[in-house]
Image (cartoon, grey):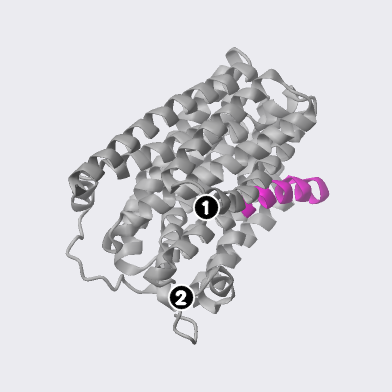
Amino acid sequence: MRSKSGTPRNTLQLILHPEFGSALAGKVILVTGFWAQTMLLVVLTFEQTHSAAWVGAITAAQLLPQLCLALVSGGMADKRGPQIPIVVGGICTGLGCIGLAIWLAVPDTVRAVPIQMPLLVASAICGVGIALASAAMQAVPPRLSEPDERNAALSLNFLPTALARTVGPIAGTALAVIFGSIATLGIVGAACIGASFIFVFIRRLGTPSDTQAPVQRLRDVLGYLRTDWTLIAVLAAVAAIGAGSEAAITLAPSIGNLLGIGASGAGWVTAAFGIGGLLGVIGFKLACLKCKTETVGCLSMALLSASIALLAIAPPLAWATALLVIAGASMVMGITGFSILAQQRSPVAFLGRVMALWVMAFTGIRPLAGISLGFISDHASPSTALLTSGVVTILASAAVFLVLSARRSSDAMTED
């Protein structure tokens, strides 16, 4: 695993390593497929229903399986390795896309039931696949790196997500314009299935954890979690960031209308947010040179909330794009910081299950956030929904900062 000199590998060496690099490439393709199909479903739903509430319901149907299956994925990653849930999850998402494409391609099936029904079913199937793969993919960097390489490996963990959040919406909308939504669903589905098989050839991901710690049951994991209030605060922060960032997905068509570029501008909105995510990877490294990880996380939450709230005033397109880029960078910086804190505080023996709780915190709140934002947007205005999202996130960031500060002071007194 180490370099030939026996020294810890740096970021570039990890990327170029056959196993780590293959896993990173596989995650980029797979998560890009996840984002592309999400944007396709969002745009299709808004075009067919002209309702932000229905868009929220569709995204909720995709996210709700996380509440049931994230822990299954995490437990399997701990006990049998992350390979199986990643491969099965990628295939499931691919089949959900291809199945919807086939349904939409047959005129008789389209007329058989309201269009919302196949969209909901396809979204739920894709959500099952994403739920199975997501928690397991969080356990990949520790499996393919040594303890003294962990920070470098974990800092790379969100690079695929940031890249996918940029490329996925652009690829999905661009391919839909060129080939049509039906063909694009088929292409994205095939890409997800193909990417999942990359993980079949990474043997280290198909073996149980080499840690012999006796923790095997979920209640043991929850028992450990109850003793670590810092970790609880970290998971709460992740949930708040998930809720705050949901506005850039559920409200993307509405934001496009608000900015005067139409519902088809949803791709522009999410792409700008994704470009910010890429910058956030660099921004996190620079910020950590001056601040502690938890401070970077809390400041990022505050910046995310301010950026989303300022979109409510419908600024000119250039300013709105800048705000979306800032929001995307803030989201990735916050998620990266709190993810590193969570993984550093988690024993390797049940890292997969702790990260499953992390995934549940990030995505479990998003169905409620998506439905709420869609309802507020339909019955009040998109501006009101954006302002509400910003206010809730800033309140959450203040609460998390106070808890983390109190725990840090408590820990310092204990050491003295």
Kind of element beneath mark 1? loop
Extreme-bottom residue of the structure: 4
- Identify residue type, mark 1: Leu
Q: Earlier in the sequence, mark 1 or mark 2?
A: 2
Residue 401 shows which numbered tag?
none
> Does residue 385 lie above or below 87 as drawn?
above
Residue linked to disc 1? 289
Residue linked to disc 2? 8
4 relative position to 118: left or right: left
Q: Which residues are magenta?
A: 162-181
Q: Position of residue 284 (x, y in %)?
A: 55, 50
64 relative position to 162: left or right: left
Q: Position of residue 233 (x, y in %)?
A: 34, 38
Name the one closer to the observer, 293 or 36.
293
Residue at (72% x, 35% y) in the render: 322
Where residue 149 sits, quadrant-wise, is bottom left
